[in-house]
Image (cartoon, helix red, strand yellow):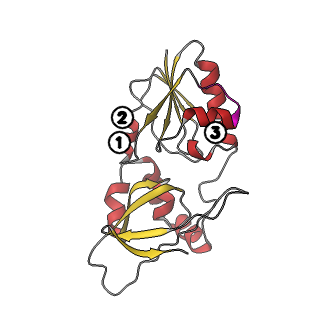
Amino acid sequence: MKVGIYDRYLATMGGGERYACKMAEVLSHSHEVDLISERLVDLRRVGEQLHIDLSRVSLKIFPYLSQEYAAYITKDYDLFVNATYLSSLSNLARRGIYLVYFPTPFDVDFKLKHRLAYLLLRGWAERINREDTLQKILPAVGVEPVVGVYDPSRFLLGGYAWTCGQAVVRIKEGQGDRPLKLRIQAGRRRGVPPAQITVRADGEVVLRDK
């Protein structure tokens, strides 16, 4: 059986990653297993850090280009396991498992204005998350995630969104005098030195955090 285990945050090597990697280790004894993530990571280093044998597991990389593309990569698996927190990725495999580490409401990071808007526009908001509308709506608000931004629906609604080490967003031209606010916060695990943030526009450095 061909098994794909999807973990966008594999490079963070946290508790959820240990769970996903342990599943990969166990299944790899009798099945062909791919760990799927957005960033290139050293599986040997991941295995050593998490004390898990990943020698029989392969790594498959794909960038998040669109919901359709992301769903397309699942179709060749006999079993697809989505081990990514708060993921809305569709599954086209023969069988699928969605790991829920703990239940999280859709509006967990909403501000008051977003909660009120959700109550008034609930049907529309739910369609954003289950239909192919993100690519039509995102350009209209001025900022469009291209690569490296996780959970773009939350990004659209003004909540936090995880990024990998390098994220690309497209700023729509013709925004007039209204400024666009894009908050960037460098989170890190305990004991890890602060990260340096560099912002480039059309390849030119416009901001470098010291």
Q: Position of residue 53 (x, y in %)?
A: 64, 25
Give the residues drawn in magenta, as a range.
50-54
Q: CA distance from mark 2 to mark 1?
A: 6 Å
Q: Quadrant of the C terminus?
A: bottom right
Say which amino acid is labelled 1.
Glu
CB-based contact (under 8 Å), mark 2 and mark 1: yes
Q: Position of residue 54 (x, y in %)?
A: 60, 26
Q: Residues within 10 Å of mark 3 (few under 14, many from 20)?
A: many
Q: CA distance from mark 2 to mark 3?
A: 23 Å
Disc sitting over residue 68 in the figure: 1
Say which amino acid is labelled 2.
Tyr
Disc sitting over residue 17 in the figure: 3
Residue 113 picture quarter: bottom right
- Circle 1 or circle 3, nearest the eye: 3
Say which amino acid is labelled 3.
Glu
Look at the image and tell me whether residue 116 can be seen.
yes
In this view, the residue farthest toward the right is: 190
Which residue is pictured at 37% across the width and 62% down the height? 138
Q: Is residue 43 above or below residue 203?
A: above
Q: Secondary structure at mark 2?
A: helix
- Circle 2 or circle 3, nearest the eye: 3
Q: Residues within 10 Å of mark 1 (few under 14, many from 20)?
A: few
198 is within the stretch colored magenta: no
Q: CA distance from mark 1 to mark 3?
A: 25 Å
Viewer-proximal residue, 137 or 4?
4
51 is within the stretch colored magenta: yes
Q: Position of residue 13 (x, y in %)?
A: 64, 43
Q: Dot 2 corresponds to which residue?
A: 72
The overriding secondary structure of the stretch rendered in magenta is loop
